[in-house]
Image (cartoon, coloured by chain):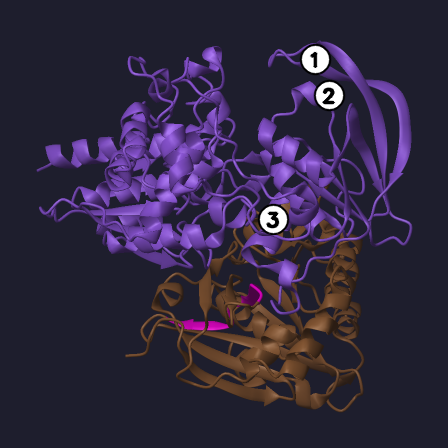
Chain colours: A brown, B purple
């Protein structure tokens, strides 16, 4: 039997985009769509949040998808099956507020694509008509397409370079659907802050309910430090315990962008240091 | 009067040396110093110190043993009441507790109980003194949720009584506020680690990365354990709720201290977690957390101001912490409160619009209420740390509607920590709102007794 936090699978799905399966029965049995985990690769590492993409109660496994862009995720990408994460906590955050809405559109962008899979699956299970829009810079960066198809009634693909599907952004696909007279009762968006903001703007006044899953910087993950705070509907909320999903129309998008920029310089230093020292 | 003698001078590293590093500020007494100080105890003292102590340490007894050089027995006496004397000796507010009520205070200077306690605690850790455990196993399981001061006492007391104790901690390091909140220069992590090694040696199973409420619900724990203790503390930070509070560069004290203490951001990039401090840092608030944040920021090389809405006399931090902060070069701005945070680049905070205040009529706390003067000025800063208090941790109550909480979010308990759910107990800041390490430990002690009592009745 594997040990708690043992890596069972770690594979590159597309350039720098990985899928990791970890043994953690206690998280697998409690996980729900929309929740996340927090992990550390080593004792000197950062505490990094990651959306739960899938879980298997019987096998006791959880699955995350990540892009190897920072010190932690690059180190993660070098882990082999049999190695153990230093720390793993979860599930964290509030589950997606899913129910039977009717017709739902779910938008995933870039590394956010895998994260829409469990939400789409849950909405589909509840009887919704699920339309998924997934988009990336180029066709090779579209991941989890087959699994998203399994739980969607329609899938629309966009690429920035036009190498597959509609040339443009996910918001262009959403606008096309809305302009052609399609109606939706609810919308979900997971991806870069700018993408979620654009989806929210396009949906405003046309889709009554809209949620976005925020990728705020976090430290504690349990509502104690306030690093992930964000103004939602005029009130300070904590992404880790009040979110990660919030009403898109109430989110202060400008503030999210500001707070995401806090450590841009240090993130580069961290990555450079790791590369030069070769410490993993 | 010869017996009263002069209080030991606790050796403290000079400010110009210590303000540049995170090593401990005060040093542990040498054995001879501890023995000499302990022998200042007068013979027929009625021990107001014991009554002044939230956990009731038998001060005269452990002092007498220390004076005799019997450090082992002194330690065993101490741990009847405080399981972690090397920690309580460092962080307790002795000046208002044992030392504050010491009869020698009137005859001269109180006995340095804290310093002697700390010496004995450190001596015992260095010499691996074993803690006696009940030979008889109870064959009953107790879950302790949260590994802070309250949880440490409950776990230690019950393990020693023969219970099977599992401790759940959300973070990757046990200790709660002792680990993330109190800086290295006041409580070194090696001391904390040793105390937890000792707890493990008592048979306590410490499980990290478990968030009770989501990983396991309270209901699930009750199926596996005969009793559950909630010692999850006062975690949720308060905000000022003024414009601009969410600009980059504005931290809560919890975030700042967690990054620096727990994640060792002061060793970035050797450690991965960054902290971004500029030339000038303003800390809002004047409690112990504010002093810890200010002194940590100073050690990271910044110029640091405490900005407080009341005056010098009204500061709530321990006198010794204020003194240390001042010696190290922390500056103070009184009768001043942020009205707004400003940013020149639209991202990072660059100034605080400060509202000048003046003392008004006394409020409920008896302190003069800060009243706006109508005057404001802009104070340039690169970083702001807010240390204005916490709410009780809402995580478990929010996932457990049956658990009764009051209007402030504090878990409602009886005098011995029993909550509205049978088998579930609570103590420490989750019950009091916001208090001290030793008050939380006092709760832990009472609750441990109640759990033992209740489980013994059940047979």
Q: Is residue B458 left or right of residue B3?
A: left
State the SS at label 1. Answer: strand
- Per the image, the residue denoted by label 1 is B368
Tag in front: 1 or 2: 2
Q: Is residue B72 magenta?
A: no
Start and end of the magenta stretch? Answer: A46-56
Give the spatial CA distance, label 3 vs label 1. Answer: 30 Å
| Rendering coords of residue B93 (x, y %) | 49, 28
| Rendering coords of residue B218 (x, y %) | 34, 46
State the SS at label 2. Answer: loop
The crowding category of the residue bearing disc 3, from other C-alpha atoms within 10 Å (few below 14, some 14 to 19, many at least 20), is: many
Earlier in the chain: of badge 3 and badge 1, it is 3
Dominant SS type (magenta): strand
- Per the image, the residue denoted by label 2 is B311
Quadrant, the C terminus of chain B: top left
| Rendering coords of residue A81 (x, y %) | 42, 85
Label for residue B257?
Answer: 3
Q: Nearer the viewer, residue A113 or B253?
A: B253
Q: Nearer the viewer, residue A22 or A192?
A: A22
Q: Quadrant of residue B138?
A: top left
Give the spatial CA distance, label 1 vs label 2. Answer: 9 Å
Quadrant, the N terminus of chain B: top left
Label for residue A88?
Answer: none
Q: Is residue A26 left or right of residue A93?
A: left
Chain of the residue that carries numbered disc 1 in the rendered image: B
Vertical placement of residue A263 versus B257, above or below: below
Q: Identify the residue at horizontal 47%, vertical 15% (top origin).
A: B105
């Amino acid at each position: 039997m594997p040990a708690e936090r043992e890596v069972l699978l770690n594979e590159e799905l597309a350039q720098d985009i990985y899928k990791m399966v970890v043994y953690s029965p206690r998280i697998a049995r409690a996980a729900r769509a929309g929740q996340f985990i927090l992990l550390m690769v080593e004792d000197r590492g950062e505490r990094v949040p990651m959306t739960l993409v899938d879980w298997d109660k019987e096998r006791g496994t959880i699955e995350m998808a990540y892009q190897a862009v920072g010190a932690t995720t690059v180190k993660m990408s070098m882990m082999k099956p049999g190695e153990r994460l230093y720390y793993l906590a979860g599930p964290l955050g509030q589950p997606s507020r899913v129910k039977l809405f009717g017709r739902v559109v779910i938008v995933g962008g870039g590394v956010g694509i895998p994260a829409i899979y469990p939400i789409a699956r849950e909405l589909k299970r509840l009887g919704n008509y699920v339309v998924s829009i997934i988009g990336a810079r180029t066709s090779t960066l579209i991941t989890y397409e087959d699994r998203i198809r399994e739980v969607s009634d329609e899938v629309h693909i966009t690429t920035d370079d036009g190498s597959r599907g509609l040339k443009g952004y996910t918001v262009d696909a959403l606008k096309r659907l809305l302009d052609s007279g399609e109606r939706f009762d609810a919308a979900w968006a997971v991806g870069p802050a700018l993408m979620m903001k654009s989806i929210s703007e396009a949906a405003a006044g046309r889709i009554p309910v809209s949620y976005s899953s925020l990728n705020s910087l976090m430290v504690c993950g349990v509502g104690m430090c306030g690093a992930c705070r964000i103004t939602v509907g005029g009130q300070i909320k904590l992404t880790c315990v009040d979110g990660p999903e919030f009403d898109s129309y109430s989110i202060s998008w400008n503030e999210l962008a500001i707070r995401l920029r806090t450590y841009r310089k240090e993130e580069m230093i961290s990555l450079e240091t790791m590369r030069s020292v070769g410490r993993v | 009067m010869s017996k009263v003698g002069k209080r030991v001078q606790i050796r403290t590293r000079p400010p110009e040396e210590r303000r540049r590093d995170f090593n401990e500020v005060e040093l542990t007494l040498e054995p001879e110093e501890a023995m000499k100080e302990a022998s200042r105890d007068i013979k027929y003292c009625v021990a107001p110190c014991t009554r002044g102590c939230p956990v009731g340490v038998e001060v005269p007894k452990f002092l007498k043993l220390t004076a005799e050089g019997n450090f082992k027995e002194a330690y065993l006496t101490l741990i009847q009441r405080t399981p972690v004397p090397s920690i309580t000796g460092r962080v307790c507010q002795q000046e208002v507790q044992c030392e504050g009520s010491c009869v020698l205070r009137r005859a001269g200077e109180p006995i340095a109980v804290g310093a002697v306690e700390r010496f004995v605690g450190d001596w015992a850790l260095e010499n691996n003194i074993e803690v006696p455990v009940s030979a008889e196993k109870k064959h009953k399981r107790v879950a302790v949720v949260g590994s802070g001061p309250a949880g440490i006492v409950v776990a230690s007391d019950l393990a020693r009584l023969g219970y099977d104790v599992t401790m759940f901690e959300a973070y990757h390091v046990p200790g709660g506020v002792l680990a993330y909140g109190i800086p290295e220069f006041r409580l070194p992590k090696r001391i904390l680690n040793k105390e937890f090694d000792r707890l493990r040696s008592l048979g306590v199973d410490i499980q990290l990365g478990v968030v009770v409420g989501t990983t396991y619900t309270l209901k699930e724990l009750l199926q596996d354990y005969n009793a559950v203790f909630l010692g999850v503390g006062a975690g949720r930070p308060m905000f000022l709720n003024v414009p601009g509070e969410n600009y980059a560069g504005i931290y809560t004290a919890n975030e700042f201290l967690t990054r620096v203490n727990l994640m060792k951001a002061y060793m970035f990039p050797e450690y991965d977690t960054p902290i971004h401090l500029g030339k000038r840092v303003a800390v809002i608030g004047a409690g112990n957390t504010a002093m810890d944040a200010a002194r940590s920021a100073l050690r990271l090389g910044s110029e640091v101001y405490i900005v407080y809405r009341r005056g010098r006399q009204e500061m709530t931090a321990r006198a010794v912490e204020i003194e240390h902060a001042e010696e190290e070069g922390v500056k103070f701005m009184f009768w001043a409160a942020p009205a707004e945070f400003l940013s020149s680049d639209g991202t990072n905070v660059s100034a605080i619009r400060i509202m000048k205040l003046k003392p008004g009529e006394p409020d409920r706390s008896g302190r003069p209420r800060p009243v706006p003067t109508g005057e404001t000025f802009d104070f340039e800063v690169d970083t702001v740390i807010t240390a204005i208090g916490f709410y009780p941790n809402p995580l478990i109550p929010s996932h457990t509607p049956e658990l009764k909480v009051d209007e402030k979010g504090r878990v409602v308990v009886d005098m011995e920590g029993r909550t509205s759910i049978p088998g579930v107990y609570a103590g420490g800041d989750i019950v009091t709102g916001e208090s001290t390490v030793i008050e939380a430990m006092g709760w832990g002690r009472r609750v441990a007794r109640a759990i033992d009592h209740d489980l013994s009745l059940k047979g």
